[in-house]
Amino acid sequence: MLVLIAYVFPWFLIALVPIFTFFFWLVRYFRPTQRHIKRLDNVSRSPLFSHLSATLQGLSTIAAFRKQDDFYNEFVTRLTTNSKFVAKPLFCMFQYTTRLSAEVEGRFNSVERLQQTIKSTPHEDFSGVDPPTNWPEEGQVEFCDVSARYRAGLETVLKSISFSVAPQQHVGIVGRTGAGKSSLTQVLYRLLELEAGQILIDGLDISTIKLDMLRSRLSIIPQEPVLFVGTLRYNLDPFGVYADEQIWTALERAHMRDAIRRLPEKLDAPVVENGNNFSVGERQLLCMARALLRNSRILVLDEASSSTDSKTDSLLQTTIRTSFAGCTVLTIAHRLNTVMDCDMIMLMDHGTYKQHCNGTYPPPA
């Protein structure tokens, strides 16, 4: 550390010599003084304890000869002598306390900055109306002239996009990196608020719905599968609302039932941080089982198979075709073969919707 400081600021070496000399002199005199004080403390402590022990053993004799005051005064004298040597090192402790308090006060700058960040960061608005209990019932999604940007002053990431997804339709969304594919997911979940336009699900404007209710009615499988520390049961059913039978059914439909059956703890098997005791493919299939368990009418796959092998990708596509046949599915992908079976394929480019193919339901003009 000293070498680095000297390299960056060579003038520091001029002050280092007198500082080092002063501390060398201080330590040279401090060590024997401290040792001498400690020795005096030990020497004065022994008579104190001896007197206290003798007093306790001879209480009845002392009381018989009425010598309580003499023994008390002797005890106070010896205690005072010992306390002198104990109190002397307190000066060093006060020095350390002062330095520590100054350091803590300096570190509280970080707390102040955290508080400023908390106050200045916009909070999500959870106000709104409660949607119907069975909403969304059909799963129709409409983007009406949607524009959005991440913050004021930045370029819009979505530019007047309009399209309609019919109930139970499977739509593939493709495009280069930065084309705005994932931004569609963010505005659908209201992670990114709209600058213009509106998004309708079953004819209901999502901006009027309570944020927690909106997100609880949709399911998403992200590119990086998310598992929390706990058990498999907790990761699949964090609120404990489903029976074991339903969980096993969801695992079977996600092609993970046999793998979990082989675990000694089964549904109570532990999950470490980030789910690292499972492979990437297994984590994706477990996220698929979680989405199946929720039985949402709308499923978003945000490049869910981009980091998986071909076998896991095949299992994911099979599950989507069979188990989500009655749901509206939005698949964001880089691999063209991932979206080949979709009813409609949308091409995104620089935040705009370019064209579609294989579509029975073209976007509105």
Image (tube, rainbow, N blue to C red):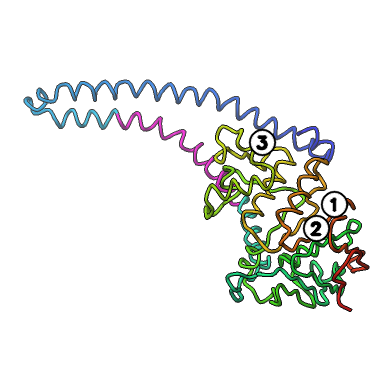
Q: From the viewer's perspective, is the residue at label 1 or at label 3 nearer?
A: 1
Q: Is residue 91 magenta?
A: yes
The x and y percentages for residue 237 are: 57, 51
The x and y percentages for residue 272 are: 62, 39
For badge 2, the amino acid type reads Thr
Indicate left or right for 179 with 230 as reference.
right
The reply to whether the C-beta atoms of the residues labelled 1 and 2 are less than 8 Å apart is yes
> Would you name the residue on which mark 2 appears?
331
Q: Quadrant of residue 196?
A: bottom right
Give me the residue at 47% from left, 22% from top.
Answer: 36
Q: In 3D space, how far apart are the residues under numbered discs 3 and 2 (Cα atoms)?
A: 27 Å
**Image quadrant where one finds the N terminus:** top right
Q: Which mark is residue 277?
A: 3
Indicate left or right for 245 with 146 as reference.
left
For badge 1, the amino acid type reads Thr
Q: Which residues are magenta?
A: 79-105
Q: Is residue 251 magenta?
A: no
**Of the pair 226 and 3, the residue shown nearer to us:** 226
> Would you name the residue on which mark 1 appears?
338
**Of the pair 53 and 349, the residue shown nearer to us:** 349
For badge 3, the amino acid type reads Asn
Q: From the viewer's perspective, is the residue at label 3 or at label 2 nearer?
A: 2
- Secondary structure mainly formed by the magenta segment: helix
Image mark count:
3
Q: Residues within 10 Å of mark 3 (few under 14, many from 20)?
A: few
